[in-house]
Amino acid sequence: MASSALAQASATTSATASVTVFQPITVAKTSDLQFGRVIRPSTGNTTIYTVAASTGAATASGGDGIFSGSTTPTRAVFTVNGEGGQAFNIVSDATVVNGGVTINLVKSAATGALDGTIGSAGTATFGVGGNVTLTDSSPTGVKSGSFNVTVTYQ
């Protein structure tokens, strides 16, 4: 005669609980975006002034507008602090509009993308450049405005 099998009334196993804790990510402005002093075109031609996000190099194309004066064009530069080796995303406003002049913003990390990686020392930098399009009817005077930049861990 076969013996009957006994069924277990309970069973136990274990699992692991874990968490990875990062230091907060922060971003601070190192310098502002500056196009310098520019001359609008004397005719209806469109002139585009550009400050490169990756290098800060300034260029003008079309018309007779040029960069001039004692103000040196520069890109905006930001420093990110956080957990070393971690990737982050960059989000910023797309434009700044003031007095009929629009500044289109262009973001760049060290990789030339819209994101970057925090270095092993816990810091990274990225730039924001942009372009301004002017015609002979563009209003004169100082045109400025602020824009927001947000960084988040990926």
Image (cartoon, helix red, strand yellow):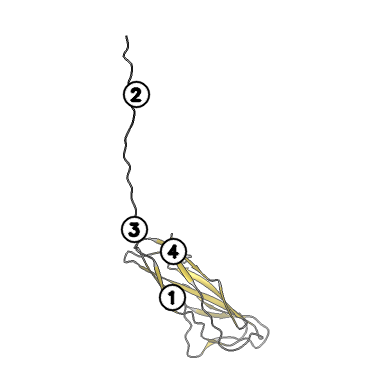
Q: CA distance from mark 1 to mark 3?
A: 28 Å
| Residue at mark 2 | 7
Is 35 left or right of 44, judged from the image as shown?
left
Q: CA distance from mark 3 to mark 4?
A: 15 Å
Please state which amino acid type lies under the numbered disc 4: Thr
Tell which tag, 4 or 1, sits nearer the viewer. 4
Image point 56% across, 84% down: which residue? 143
Up-down relation of residue 76 to residue 39 (above or below): above
Gap in angstroms between the C-alphas marked 4 and 2: 53 Å
Name the quadrant containing residue 116. bottom left
Disc with the residue nearer the chain's start (1 vs 2): 2
Secondary element at image label 3: loop
Amino acid carrying label 1: it is: Val
Q: Earlier in the sequence, mark 3 or mark 4?
A: 3
Secondary-structure class at tag 2: loop
- Label annotation for residue 21: 3
**Which residue lies at the image location 61% right of the left edge and 86% below the top edge?**
40
Quadrant of image for the C terminus:
bottom left
Marks 4/1: CA distance?
17 Å
